Amino acid sequence: MKILYLFADQKSEWNSSEIRLAVPHRAFKKSPNHESLMLDVGSWIVGTPEAKEKSWWADAIVVQRLFLGQAMVAMEFWKARDKIIIGDVDDAYDLMPRHVPTYRFWQEGLSRVMINGKEMLKKMEFTPVEQQIWGAKLCHAVATPSKILTKDWSKHIGDKAIYVPNYLDLNHYLLRHRPIPNPNLTIIGWGGSLSHYDSFKHSGVVPALIRLLNKKPNVVLCLAGGVQRISTLFVRDVNPDQILVKEWVPYAQWPSILADFQIGLIPLYGPYDQRRSPIKALEYAIMGIPWVGSKSNVYDEFGPLGTQVDNTEDAWYKAMLEMVEDLPRFRKDISGTVDLVSKWDINNNLENIVRSYMIDGTKRIVRASVNGKVPDRQGAQNEVAS
């Protein structure tokens, strides 16, 4: 299959486009059986010569999140030319908290435009959340990395909502240099974007960390990524030397940051967080990092590898304190994860992705089941025919 991935992230905010598109793109480029190209979704909507050339080349076109507005015209154009159109989303835009920078775009329909040389906010007649539902109905399928989010989309488009996990290239992590831990220092770490602010503020993890850091001067909290606002939650309550803030780094450098963590965190709060993928638990498993996280179905099969707690200060504090004081035991518990994480290696799942994007003779998607297993192609066709 020839797949054209249309990324929506800008260079300054490059994040989900890496995991959802660039990781599989690089793997497909090395595959002997399939091919892949990438292009920004804006060029595709406009219909540049490059966009047309790549679209004619492709069998399937994956549109990241912006299958709305004028993109729907382009989608219909290429569908009429027998291209498979797959929408791809990794966020619950309808449940997005107000603090997320793109909240006003998705839920209020406000976009920044230039009028007479001045940047102004323009309100759309219909919000992108509404438009995205219309666009989803034009797609052959909409793929998400969350089983709960897939179920949400099935309410709008039935079995055209498909589960395609966030697979990772294991070698990207395993081939990194692992520093020798300082026996006199324990680093508790977390990395992510500003969209996780509520995860910290309302989960109980912040007061628990403040207690822990004040009790254990040899423990350091490392916050990496878009964390400036999150880091302010600890100001005045913790020794500044125990808070290490690391700026956002390109994905190529991220495993080197992650390798410093001795304990990982996965705080979650509210329905928006419940629709995240288990990527943090997967990354910790790959790197052999024990973790503490909010009780959730998000973790999927990685749940047993971490300590899950109620979102209360005491629960977080007791779990983290126990892990700090008996870290070798928790490291041992997570050491035998090779078989599990190999199932999530992108290089072992290219055929699953391809078969998830296939359509049958009636132009209906041959759906991947929600547990990630893809049904037999012929069997699925027979099922549709019956």
Image (spheres, rainbow, N blue to C red):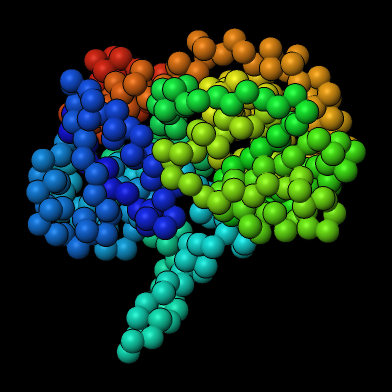
150, 19: nearer the viewer: 19
147, 295: nearer the viewer: 295
Residue at the spot 66% in from the left edge and 59% down from the top edge = 229
- Quarter of the figure with residue 16: top left
Q: Assign the C terminus to one quadrant of the image.
A: top left
Residue at the spot 36% in from the left edge and 34% down from the top edge = 23
Residue at the spot 46% in from the left edge and 35% down from the top edge = 145
Q: Position of residue 373 (x, y in %)?
A: 41, 19
- Asked if one can make out residue 43 in the rendered structure from this viewpoint, the answer is yes
Residue lying at the far bottom of the rendered structure: 116
Q: Is residue 110 left or right of residue 352?
A: right
227, 273: nearer the viewer: 227
Q: Position of residue 232 (x, y in %)?
A: 72, 58
- In this rendering, the answer to whether 164 lies above or below 335 is below
- Quarter of the figure with residue 148: top right
- In this rendering, the answer to whether 201 lies above or below 171 is below
Q: Position of residue 385 (x, y in %)?
A: 25, 22
Q: Assign the N terminus to one quadrant of the image.
A: top left
